[in-house]
Amino acid sequence: MKKLFTLFVSLWVAMASLFAANMTGGEVFYLTPHTTWNSDNARYAIYFFNNSTGKNTWASMTKVEGETNLWQGTAPSGNWANLIFCRMNPGTTNNSWDNNVYWGGQTQDLTFDGTKNWFTVDSKKDAWNKPAGSWSTYTPPTPDPEPEPDPTPDPEPEPDPTPDPEPDPDPVPDPTPDPEPANQITLTFVNAESWENVYVHAWDGTATGTAWPGQKLTASGEKINGYDTYLFTFDEGAYAKCLFNCGGENPDGCKTADQSIDITKPYFSKGEWYANAADIPAQVADVWTVVGAKGLFATEWDFSNKAYDMSESGAGVFTLVVEDVALDATAYEYKFIQNRSWSGAQYPQQDNYSVTVSEAGTYTVTYTLDVNAGQGSCQLEKASTPDPEPDPTPDPEPEPDPTPDPEPEPDPTPDPEPEPDPTPDPEPEPDPTPDPEPDPDPVPDPDNTITFTVQVPEGTVECWIAGTPGWAFIQMEEVEDEENLFTVTVENTVLDGAQWKYASGKDWQYAEVIEGNGNRTEAGDPYDVVTAWQKLYDPDFEPIDPYYAIRGLNGDASWTGSGDIKLEENADGSEWSALGFTVAEGESFKVIYIDENEDASGWYGGIEEGCEVGQTFDKDGNIVLPAGTYDLYFKSESKLMWISKVDTPTDAEEAIAEIIYAVDGTIIAPAPFAIIDLSGKDVTNANGSLQGTYIVKTLNSATKISVK
């Protein structure tokens, strides 16, 4: 039955290919998205790929002039079998699956029949990811015709009575003249950031974009203003955009912003392009700027405002004092940015600092950054209410009375002593109606107070809310006698125009899942409902030791991590290995990095040059191998792997292998034998102090063994 099913699938694929044509460079494709895709000012790109060659690339799309909902994109040079139209993040120009997944929209894998070049996405509102659609043919409008020729042509010029003699013919005409050589462009990167490695990622031109993190550059040996320089040379027009980064495990943490290439300014230093090396300022001192939430700052997270630049108050110590800042009683986040660019250094590097205002009022805010210690701080001093100014014009002295009052006459008869009251006044009756309790001070303004209530998924331990203004996290309380229901009342908040979001922990990695990664703007009835968390916070979680693993084998479910094959680390951490793992027909995989939070924070599919195991790559860059058993060695520095196929041993070889083992740095094997390390060096004399992976050669076999 399995063979019949396989035959059916093969026939179906073969029939589908009869109606598909490979795409080559220059073919123009058109897309009409549905209105849901067009929200958030989304842009579009096309992903071209060919599984048979393992190659893939992206092409950005632009809106067709004069059309309201029609986009066009051109296939880059190459031979492509399939394409996918993708909805992209409008805040970036770099095309990648990260940008597509974030904005959540793509078509299915599509083929081109050679004529129909216009794909219209299904207009159903719920047709979001991989919706249906239809192909048709789009013909660009015909340009205006050429102007009519002049009906009265100019008269023929008089012939020259003495014609010039015929020039000598070319004695040997060149049957195939050489094409004009492409103009070479060289960009110079000035490594003012002192990165250990420099990469350039380039795209959006006639050439296929580089694979992230890009091409590694080599120092030129020349210095500008004391900094090493790195050169990137390419054919003019091959790339229109680029960015520089440091590579490594986290290239996103040390990269420049996306740059438009201007061949008239080929020198790049500290975020700026220059026409000549002499134009680059000589080691300009770093500028440190404070940015943060609105309220604490005039514009939130805006490093272009020079009013928030700091002054150096000591060696590596910078300060800024901002007076008369009106603050609400809430928490505000802030951080320090180098040279007004996200590509420069930041403190803190990952999260933000936070300062809490306990009482609303006007404050003097003092920021301090110690670059040497890598620490920043913020001090608040509430402005005191000044004493009233003295009256500059004192009251005039009273005029003296010209006629003094006469002295009073003495009373000749003093008043008699009063008789004592024989009956004292009765005690006053108590007030039967006491005064009501005074109202608590202050009384919150109900118009500026909102109570948020939310139902959360099963298993949620904590719930937090953050929103405008400031986006500071506020912990919510669990509603008594109600399961999975949390509430909090927030003062000084107006619902109209507010935005908010829930999280299972005090960090954005625990935020709720919202389509399009947006924010809430309307309250639910009777309360808000969270359907899923990006990650569920566990207060009892303890960080793990990071490691590398193979992910993707053992079925589709293993892409979630259920089938990970953990790699073993060698002594110095430079190499990780998985020996004797099995690949089934049709399976693909990558090596992933699992960080201390048990999150997959790096995906790698690079193969070392010279490795020949017949691997190919699918459209997502995953490694595809023929079914069999393999050994894999992963280099943690280069992020490349070496894969070798393990031949199925004979019964005799298995018997020999069973008596080859290692203990306490010593390999035990039937004599005579030799121990060879992976570089090919004979290390038999070091037996007894071995650690790592080796090949043990006996008279009849060669066996790979790991020694710990």
Image (spheres, grey):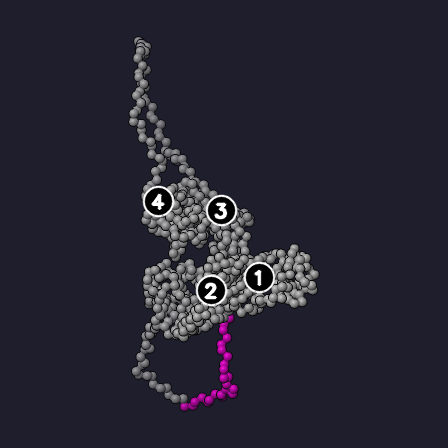
Eye-nearest disc, 1 or 4: 1
| Looking at the image, residue 403 lies above or below residue 537 | above
Eye-nearest disc, 2 or 3: 3
**Callout 3 secondary element:** loop
First in residue order: circle 1 vs circle 3: 3
Quadrant of the image for the N terminus? bottom left
Q: Which SS does the magenta portion mostly show?
A: loop
Magenta span includes 164: yes
First in residue order: circle 1 vs circle 2: 1
- Whether residue 307 is visible to the viewer of this picture, yes or no, is no
Q: Which residue is mark 2?
A: 620
Distance between the Cα atoms at labels 1 and 4? Answer: 59 Å
Q: Which residue is mark 1?
A: 579
First in residue order: circle 4 vs circle 3: 4
| Looking at the image, residue 127 lies above or below residue 334 | below
Distance between the Cα atoms at labels 4 and 2? Answer: 46 Å
